[in-house]
Image: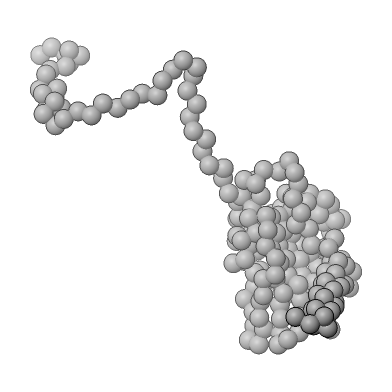
Amino acid sequence: MSRLLRWGIGLLLIASLLFAAFFLLPFRSWLPGGTVADVATAEVVNGSAFNRLFPSPEPGEQLVFTQEKRGFSEARLKQGQSIKALLAISDTTTAPEARSKFEASSQQLQGWPLVEQGNQASALLVAERFQVKVIGQGAGLDAEQRHELIGAFDLHGLAALKPARAARAPKVLAPGSRQPVKIPVSAAEKQAAQSVPSVLEPAA
């Protein structure tokens, strides 16, 4: 590989990283999905459970999932080659501070509190736990369009989601006790045992 080609690949990689940072860092605080060290995995809904609850794209649109992790899922709503909006669902169990902004909400959508974040972002808190967010991209979306997109999520299905239950722990025996052992019994022995009258049967 020539030196010129290596330089070209290196500059292309740097440009890609700068491009990603320019577009994603401004929205980092708007898309909570970080985990909290003392929150058990079993208490947080997995991001893969959110994917089926996103809106179905309209003709000419495409929904492309870009991030999925514990308690968070994000997708881009594309129209042709343009990104129309960023859509996200997060389990605020991993970021409880995200719920505080809904306390002063004066708007509701389907009975849940709705807030605006700047001119391009709207967020809804579902079942006091799940945050649904739409962020306009490119030419942008007005508030009514963002609210329509939020309403297209399966919000009632989201409200019904529960975190995965922890696997049942094995039964712990008391100190000194032993696990009972099952002894195989033949059919003839079972029949012989059934023919013996029980001493607990009442006398005729």
Report which quarter residue 113 is drawn in: bottom right
Compared across the picture, whether 202 is left or right of 165 comes to: left
Vertically, is 121 above or below 125?
below
Which residue is painted at 64% across and 69% down in the image? 54
Compared across the picture, whether 193 is left or right of 118 comes to: left
Total of numbered circles in the picture? 0
Q: Position of residue 117 (x, y in %)?
A: 87, 66
Closest to the observer, 14 or 93: 14
Which residue is painted at 26% across and 26% down in the image? 183
Q: Position of residue 75 (x, y in %)?
A: 70, 71
Compared across the picture, whether 192 is left or right of 102 comes to: left
Which residue is painted at 66% across and 81% down in the image? 62
Determine the residue located farthest toward the front in the rendered image: 2
The answer to whether any part of residue 129 appears in the image is yes
Q: Position of residue 92 (x, y in %)?
A: 74, 53
Report which quarter residue 116 is drawn in: bottom right
The N terminus: image quadrant: bottom right
Compared across the picture, whether 106 is left or right of 181 comes to: right
Closest to the observer, 16 or 20: 16
The answer to whether any part of residue 130 appears in the image is no
The C terminus: image quadrant: top left
Which residue is painted at 33% across and 25% down in the image? 181
Q: How is the image coloured?
A: one colour
Vertically, is 193 above or below 90?
above
Q: Position of residue 61 (x, y in %)?
A: 67, 83
